[in-house]
Amino acid sequence: MEDLTQTTIFPHTYKFTASSNTTQINLPRIASHVAIGSEDKKIYFCFEGGSDGGALPSNHGFVPKENMLHIALGKGRNRTDSIYIASSSASCDITIILTEE
């Protein structure tokens, strides 16, 4: 698990190593957008149905290698608190960029 909830300076860039199992990323409440990607490999992500260290659920999205995907987060009760990220194979470095409006 990667806990970014205490982040207070934006934009904020964070890098970690992911495996083929999902890693839970806890997002700060004041972030309104998240961008995810990897230079090394295709990565998978989901918002619901994931668990830290678990298998990738069938409802997931992907980001091709050498790309970043920008996602606007919901507001109020519609906002997710976490994103789950996994590498397509073995492990790879993941970059996360958090921004606020």
Image (tube, helix red, strand yellow):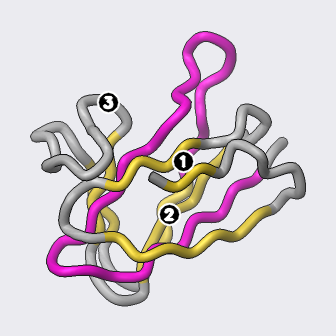
User: Residue drawn at (55%, 31%), measured in percent from left and top?
Assistant: 81
Left or right of residue 10, residue 39 in this image: left
Nearest to N terminus: mark 2 or mark 1: 2
Residue 48 tag number: 3
Give yes or no for contact between labels 2 and 1 (Cβ–Cβ under 8 Å).
yes
Magenta includes 94? Answer: yes
Q: Which amino acid type is marked by label 2?
A: Ile
Name the quadrant containing residue 101.
top right
Q: Does the stretch in magenta take in 39?
A: no
Q: Position of residue 20 (x, y in %)?
A: 19, 67
- What residue would you read off at disc 1? 71
Mark 2 or 3, closer to the camera = 3
Instruction: Find the distance from the CA under tag 3 to the CA under tag 1.
Output: 15 Å
Q: How many marks?
A: 3
Graded by Cα atoms within 10 Å as few (under 14), some (14 to 19) or many (20 or more), the crowding at tag 1 reads few
Tell me which residue sits at (69%, 43%) in the image. Answer: 5
Residue 67 shows in the view: no
Frontmost residue, 98 versus 70? 98
Q: Mark 3 or 1 closer to N-term?
A: 3
Give the residue displayed 28% in from the left and 62% down from the top. Answer: 86
**Residue identifier under label 2:** 36
Point out residue 88 in the picture as x, y percentages from the top left corner.
18, 71
**Relative to residue 73, is residue 67 depicted above or below?**
below
Residue 30, quarter of picture = top right
x and y percent of residue 13 in the render? 70, 70
Q: Around disc 3, counting alpha carbons within 10 Å, would you say few (fewer than 14), some (14 to 19), or many (20 or more)?
A: few
